[in-house]
Amino acid sequence: MTALAAEPQATRREWIGLAIIALPCMLYSMDLTVLNLAVPQLSEDLAPSASQLLWIVDIYGFMIAGSLITMGTLGDRIGRRRLLLIGAVAFGLASVLAAFSTSAEMLIAARAMLGVAGATLAPSTLSLIRNMFLDPSQRTVAISVWITSFSVGGALGPLVGGILLQYFWWGSVFLIAVPVMALLLVLGPVLLPEYRDPEAGRLDLASAALSLVSVLAVIFGLKQTAENGFGWLPALSILAGVAIGLVFVRRQRRLADPLIDLELFRSAAFSTALGVNISVFFVFFGSFLFMAQYLQLVIGLPPLQAGLWSLPSTIGFIAVTMSTPTILRRVRPAYVMGASLAAAAVGFGVMTQIAGDYGLAVLVTASIIFSMGLAPVITLATDMIVGAAPPERAGSAAALSETGSEFGGALGIAVLGSVGTAIYRSRMAADLPNGIQPDLVETARDTLGGAVGVAESLAAELAGPLLEAARDAFTQGLQMTAAISVAVALAAAVAAVMALRHIEVDADHGE
């Protein structure tokens, strides 16, 4: 503990700089959610095909996931602040391009540029925190603020977007980024210090290309599995991505200046925290996929009310995230993670009981419990990942942390989505009422949204039984995915306690 006392304390400048860092993080998550509200208006204006519309929505997340590793390592080489400011300029310009797009192709290109620019934000800001806050306890507080900024952005996105769309055209949702990025460009050079690896070698472009293609192929395959079920196309995409990833890893072992320092994985704290982080986002994203559909298609709430009912879990998540540093003063990190994951398992257990007239109350209660349970885990896992890396490799570690989050979320949506869909289709094959036209039967059996659409075209004596069967089938799928989430959360809890119990309270996780 004597080494801890020697760590320099952050000054007022660092804490004000943290507030500046939080701004692009809010925008990062807002851009993931705000477009969904604008889809009806832009569809009417640009008339994209069904395939083009999917790419408009998905390309941003794809390019972020594929570019994170390269951007994190690039920050180590050219400077984290410099990369952040370059990304801010690119994000602002791409936002203007997206706002004034005149065709679907132009908007897809602009969203792709936004994704590449967005990939500079998370690893740059997180690695800056690693270097600005050397004291472990202060760094945990700073990371709590950093994570909270993403949650706030996710919560504000639908609300701000809804207000803008009520008074302006669809492109206005992209222009939110311009003043924020302008403020970052003005204050960033003054308040944020520059950090880079003084011994960093050149960027290996072949490794950058391999990492981009590998991540994009796997994410694309998982996304296709979630949307269309498991087939030869997503299987080939995932296998190709894994194969290219293996080539990437072998290349890193031979390079004098690798894109990723594989020595990081020798740290038990780093490897375990990364695995736990992937598990957390697996259950988090998978669960919210079903929650949104349950609120709107089973209970029948309009989108705004459905969004408002998701706010209690967001508020609980933020409150517990900000209280995590206080908890760590008394309890070892491993036991905080284990207890928090166990609490999240209780929340998912509550969700397995969702049914009947009390579905909304059960869903909201469950989401509050598991969100509050997962909040400290995300904070601690992120802290351990960046703390396990030496300061000069913070960008690479931050990129791996964010890439793990993207993979976990995509995997959760694909796996849990496939399980839920399989149960839905199985139950509908058995319970679909007779008398529905053959050309509508397949649509009703495919998804809950399809069944709701079919019901609108049927007479009341057929629509009622169809909706009841479809909603019951979907609910059974939700219950099963919640049970799987219980098992994943408990397994992650055991792994965290067993592998990390040696880490002391307020200990530097890198030691």
Image (spheres, rainbow, N blue to C red):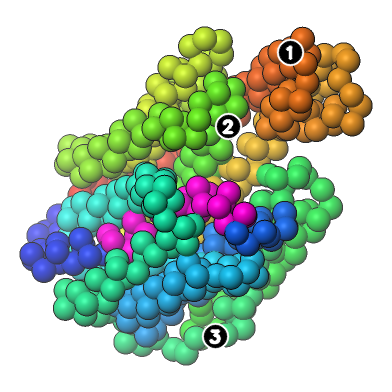
Label 2 to label 1, Cα distance in Å? Answer: 23 Å
Identified by mark 1, the residue type is Ala
Image quarter (top left, top right, bottom left or bottom right) of the C terminus: bottom left
Name the chief secondary structure element in magenta: helix
Front in this rendered view, residue 220 or 457:
457
Neighbor class of circle 1 (other Cα within 10 Å; few <14, some 14-19, many 20+) is: few
Label 3 to label 1, Cα distance in Å? Answer: 64 Å
Q: Residue at x 80, y 33 (%)?
A: 443
Mark nearer the N terminus (2 vs 3)? 3
Number of residue marks:
3
Asked which quadrant contains residue 319, the reply is top left
Identified by mark 2, the residue type is Gln
Q: Residue at x 26, y 64 (%)?
A: 21
**Measured from the top left, where is residue 64 in percent x and y?**
52, 65
User: The residue tagged with tag 3: helix, strand or loop?
Assistant: loop
Q: Which mark is residue 460?
A: 1
Magenta region, residue range: 22-44
User: The residue tagged with tag 2: helix, strand or loop?
Assistant: helix
Nearer to us: label 2 or label 1: 1
Could you tell me if the residues under marks 2 and 1 are in contact, i.e. CB atoms within 8 Å? no
Residue 469 seen from this side: no
The extreme bottom residue here reads 202
Residue 442 seen from this side: yes
Front in this rendered view, residue 214 or 120:
120
Neighbor class of circle 2 (other Cα within 10 Å; few <14, some 14-19, many 20+) is: some
Give the residue pinned by disc 2. Answer: 293
Front in this rendered view, residue 153 or 255:
153
